[in-house]
Amino acid sequence: MTSNETLFARAQAVIPGGVNSPVRAFRAVGGTPRFIRRAQGAYLWDADGRRYVDYIGSWGPMILGHGHPAVLEAVQRAAADGLSFGAPTEAEIELAEAIIARVPGLEQVRLVSSGTEAGMSALRLARGATGRSKIVKFEGCYHGHADALLVKAGSGLATFGVSTSAGVPAEVVQHTLVLEYNHVAQLEQAFAEHGRDIACVMIEPIAGNMNFVRASLPFMRRLRELCTRHGALLVFDEVMTGFRVALGGAYSVYAKAIPGFRPDLFVFGKVIGGGMPLAAFGGPRAIMEQLAPLGPVYQAGTLSGNPVATACGLATLKEISKPGFFDALAARTKALVDGLVAVAQDAGVPLVGECEGGMFGFFFADALPQNYAAVMATDKERFNRFFHAMLDRGIYLAPALYEAGFVSAAHSAEDIDATLRAAAEALRG
Ligand SMILES: *Cc1c(COP(=O)(O)O)cnc(C)c1O
């Protein structure tokens, strides 16, 4: 039997940092990552045979919990018919129709294999469709690791960004403007200065890559107005929030509050693949038909619309569309967040939390942060202690204070209760 420690040592010899995606290495919180052997429902089992209640859910996709029978059956049936054809299939049409049916106003989608690929392609499409170069993103939002999007704010307000990664030439990010999330005046200034050159504004409407920060209604309303007035496309990156915070994604949350509200382009991933590599981007037909083979914007993929991934996504979308699914998921998620706030209060620890649908966040702070700097100013030492105390008690939370959490339909009331008991102990300790 191999333990987490042995596996981590072995992994580090052949994989940089021992992981295939950096956050898995536990660098933010310290300690040894858990090597997962199997998962079922709300639980993961690691290499040491320990069980954990899973609040990461593969970073969002596992909204039904692990090993859902209908999803497994769809995947097995699709696999038996062939793993990949590199030719169109009926299942791709069905998945595209299923996505469009759940997002009012969305007319066409193209399927790809990762959120990064979807975000990168949406960006190219926005630039191609508008004939403009500049793009706007917000500090703390993550849109995958395309060069032009790996950017943080430079010094001073509303300056063009500097890359957060080596290997990205300054020339590649010179068209990326990075603004503070929820900062209306900065947004107005950026459009006043660069409005004619801005191809698109890309945003996580509920930002899950800085834990959980909502775009305020005034900010979102103004963003839509400015994009429309200046002919820039508003791109909703719903890779995390799509089919997770509601069946219609974060878009449906904002459309309810702002009459007539609609983004121009959407980016999806995570839940739409149900745990398989699948993502998508979409928008109005007139824009989407700028893509090859119809239009001048090139985009392609050997495994795009892969039949096994497509079957997995379709089965997942069917399950989450059943009546009452999101009401139940949202109630369970809220019970978790309200419970965390209550046990923290009992322990005299400042903690605030937020949730929407099956996505949640909590901060060791007195008030909910509204931007990245405020998130990073919350109590990191306390978060790291809490993370490890919870992990020791069999509760698997995201290993960094800037990551969101996820509840699945497989999490029972007893799982939530057990989590809150563990939290009460962890916070007293
Ligand atoms: C996860 C994520 C991505 C990147 O998706 P990958 O499949 O990891 O490439 C992009 N945008 C958001 C909002 C995400 O949460």
Image: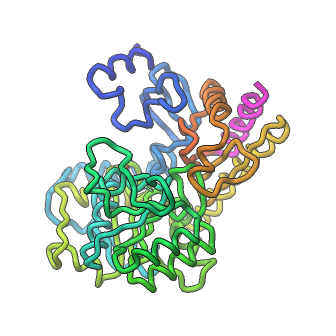
The quarter in which the N terminus is drawn is: top left
Residue 240 against residue 96 in the figure, above or below: above
- On the rendered structure, is 365 left or right of 192? right
**Residue furthest to the front:** 156
Q: Residue 383's quadrant in the figure?
A: top right
At x 36%, y 31%, the residue is: 19
Please tell me which residue is depicted at 72% across the width and 34% down the height of the picture: 423
As drawn, is 240 to the left or to the right of 357?
A: left
Residue 94 included in the magenta stretch of the image: no
Q: Measured from the top left, where is residue 75 in percent x and y?
A: 33, 51
**Residue 250 x %, y %:** 54, 67
- Quarter in which the C terminus is drawn: top right
Q: Does residue 299 appear left or right of residue 120 in this picture?
A: left
Instruction: Decide whether residue 416 is among the magenta residues.
Output: yes
Query: Coloured how?
Result: rainbow
Provide the residue span drawn in magenta: 412-429
Residue 277 percent coordinates (x, y): 32, 51
Residue in the picture at 61% in, 78% down = 256
In the image, is residue 163 above or below residue 248?
Answer: above
Q: Position of residue 238 (x, y in %)?
A: 45, 63
Q: Can residue 318 be seen by looking at this rendering?
A: no
Above or below residue 217? Residue 336 is above
Of residues 279 and 322, the one drawn nearer to the viewer in this rendering: 279
Front-lying residue, 354 or 269: 354
Q: In this view of the protein, can residue 338 be seen by the observer?
A: yes
Residue placed most toward the observer, 210 or 183: 183
- Look at the magenta stretch and give its main secondary structure: helix
